[in-house]
Amino acid sequence: QICQMVDTYLEQGFTYFDTAYMYHSGKSENMLKKALVERYPRGSYLVADKLPTMFLKEPEDVTRIFQEQLDRTGLSYFDYYLLHCLDKENYQTAERLDCFAFGMQMKKEGKIKHLGFSFHDSAELLDQILTAHPEVEFVQLQINYYDWESDNVQSEKCYETARKHGKDIIIMEPIKGGRLADIPENAAALLQKQNPQLSIPSWAVRFTASLPG
């Protein structure tokens, strides 16, 4: 079934695949190898993987896990590589273990094409990180219309911060884990009245896709 999903996705013209070290109890990267890497030419897709900052204790963990990820996926390089889930605590770990410098070294060696990070914290902290590390090329942010003005997620504020620093943005949670595909009836009625031809989840996708950057 996963192979069929990969085939359909590529047939529709999409190319970006996102995985991570701990996804699906550590099996995601190996499944990506079986369903994608072993079945399609390398130039036909893009892969994003992530350094699990929450698992890092010692400097040697960084190089060990990175090599593990290459082995698990069967790749010689990642198109996009992210420091995973930066918040206040994980950012301190990334700084203590020189993870940004490691990423830049892997980029220099051709094992990473584009370096960035995924983020789960305040716009204030995001501004601090991007000021301290202008070398990163992109940021992955939780953005959807439900969280746009949220005090907790701060979608809009984080989006504007990344734009201020001139960074490309990759969006996660555009449909909020599926929750914006099944919204309360009165909210759905408002959208259907506006345009009955559009599906409920399509409103969430089009909201995020309409944002510059």
Image: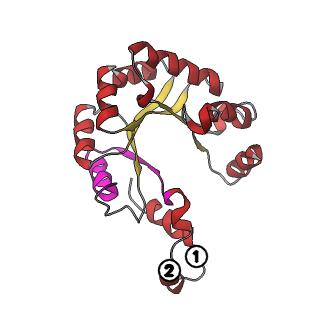
Let me know if residue 50 appears in the view.
yes
Residue 99 figure quarter:
top left
The crowding category of the residue bearing disc 2, from other C-alpha atoms within 10 Å (few below 14, some 14 to 19, many at least 20), is some
Let me know if residue 47 appears in the view.
no
Question: Which of the pair 114/187 is nearer the observer?
Answer: 187
Q: In the rendered view, would you say 59 is above or below 137?
A: above
The residue lying at 32 percent from left, 61 percent from top is 150
Res 159 label: none
Numbered disc in front, either 1 or 2: 2
Over which residues does the magenta segment extend? Answer: 152-176
Q: In the rendered view, would you say 199 is above or below 112?
A: below
Pointers 1 and 2 in contact (C-beta within 8 Å): yes
**Residue farthest to the top?**
60
Say what secondary structure mark 2 lies in: helix
**Residue type indicated by callout 2:** Leu
Residue 131 x/y as whole percent: 22, 36
Residue 178 x/y as whole percent: 55, 60
**Residue farthest to the bottom?**
193
**Residue type indicated by callout 1:** Leu
The residue lying at 47 percent from left, 79 percent from top is 187
Instruction: Tell whether position 155 is magenta.
Output: yes
Residue 17 x/y as whole percent: 59, 42
Report the number of discs.
2
Question: Which of the pair 184/47 is nearer the observer?
Answer: 184
Q: In the rendered view, would you say 181 is above or below 185?
A: above
Dot 1 or dot 2: first in sequence order is 2
The crowding category of the residue bearing disc 1, from other C-alpha atoms within 10 Å (few below 14, some 14 to 19, many at least 20), is few
Res 198 label: 1
Q: In 3D space, how far apart are the residues under numbered discs 1 and 2 (Cα atoms)?
A: 8 Å
- The residue indicated by pointer 2 is 191
